[in-house]
Image (cartoon, grey):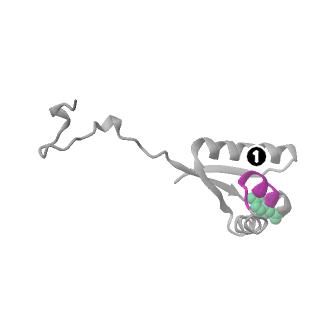
Amino acid sequence: MTNEDDKNGNGQLVLDSRSQTKKPSMYKVVMLNDDYTPMEFVVHVLQKFFRRSSSEATQIMLNVHQRGVGVCGVYSFEIAESKAQKTMDHARENDHPLQLQLEKE
Ligand code: TYC
């Protein structure tokens, strides 16, 4: 049974604030430009780790190259962190200095 304390002045049921759910924050994975990573490698990682088409990947790479930064995608914290780390690990294995960061939306 519902307790009278759970009702407001109109007799409507009010949920305890602790039982209200919160939407998880979303994070942008931001890619930074550098002078050394080859353009083809950047396009390759955008396809491999961010599931971008060839034309999307090329457009994002050119944005980063021309403006200094660009958004690879927006994900929950765990997914964003994992994609950024896997991409940088792959870049290091290939001796490229490519850097990615997370930015809270
Ligand atoms: N600026 C690099 C070059 O001229 C290409 C590049 C693009 C590097 C995007 C990093 O995130 C990057 N080879």
Is the CB of the residue bearing disc 1 within 8 angstroms of ligand 1?
no
**Can residue 21 be seen here?**
yes
Measuring 72% from the left and 70% from the top, which residue is drawn there? 66
Furthest toward the front, the residue is 1
**Magenta stretch contains residue 82:** no
Q: Nearer the viewer, residue 17 or 59?
A: 17
In terms of image quadrants, where is residue 56?
bottom right
How crowded is the residue under tag 1: few (<14 C-alpha within 10 Å), some, or many (20+)?
Answer: some
* Number of disc labels: 1
Image: magenta residue range: 42-52
Left or right of 57 on screen, residue 23: left
In terms of image quadrants, where is residue 69?
bottom right
Left or right of 36 on screen, residue 46: left
For the N terminus, the quadrant is top left
Q: Give the secondary structure at mark 1.
A: helix
Q: What amino acid is labelled 1 in the image?
A: Met
Residue 63: percent from left, percent from top? 70, 68
- Give the main secondary structure of the magenta stretch: helix
Left or right of 82 on screen, residue 26: left
Residue 103: percent from left, percent from top? 57, 51
Measuring 19% from the left and 30% from the top, which residue is drawn there? 3
Measuring 88% from the left and 47% from the top, which residue is drawn there? 94
Q: Nearer the viewer, residue 87 or 10?
A: 10
